[in-house]
Image: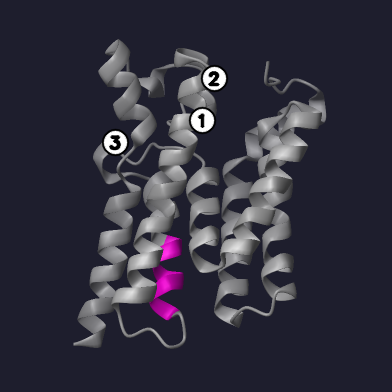
Amino acid sequence: MEYLITLGVIIGAYLIGSISTGYLIVKAKTNQDIRTIGSGSTGATNVKRVLGKKWFFIVLLLDALKGATPVLLAKYLTNDPYGINAVLASIFVIVGHSKPIFLQFKGGKSVASGVGTILALNFFVGLAIAAIWGTITYTSKYVSLGSIIALAISPILMYFFKNPIGYVIYCTIAAIYIIYLHRQNIVRLVKGEENKVR
């Protein structure tokens, strides 16, 4: 029975992650496919190019909530003494966001949803990561740089705050995965060609 619950957590988290809020909002307001605009990402940064700053923050919040929801459900509604279901929910919700089944596996870069998962695993670590992201993004004007550094620091903070080793491993996996999704941004940062937030 517990194996079926764990399978349900995996499938449920992936399907929740596959709900692309950026795509749905842009489609509803402009009838455009955001995957054909700008970077082609369904995330908040690309939404900002189409709808402006207000919708950037709305999509950011919704994606973070999307990331947190299946993790919280796994933590508190399943028998999960070692945090395994919560970690699996975290992994599969960010995979769903970046590779959504409903959009031919072309989604966003899982930064906001990833921060949402960390908030659900440990609220204070999540807040610290969000603050680091916000500070670096604001000072450098590069969303990608803030995202890369904040996620890279997440396993260190998760370990420092004495969380379960599974949470530390998850943050390490998530950081590697999300940084990999930013590989083109890294190339542009090195070349000085990355777009700044205005």
> Contact, CB < 8 Å: mark 2 with mark 1?
yes
User: What element does badge 3 sit on?
Assistant: helix
One can see residue 83 in this view: yes
The residue lying at 41 percent from left, 48 percent from top is: 65
**Position above or below: 24 against 33:** below
On residue 195, the disc is none
Q: Amino acid at mark 1?
A: Phe
Q: Amino acid at mark 3?
A: Leu
* Residue range highlighted in magenta: 84-91
User: What element does badge 2 sit on?
Assistant: helix
Determine which residue is flagged by label 2. Answer: 53
Q: Amino acid at mark 2?
A: Lys
**Position above or below: 76 against 17:** below
Between the C-alphas of marks 3 and 1, the distance is 22 Å
Determine which residue is flagged by label 3. Answer: 103
Determine which residue is flagged by label 1. Answer: 57
One can see residue 151 in this view: no
Q: How many callouts does the rendering have?
A: 3
Between the C-alphas of marks 2 and 1, the distance is 7 Å
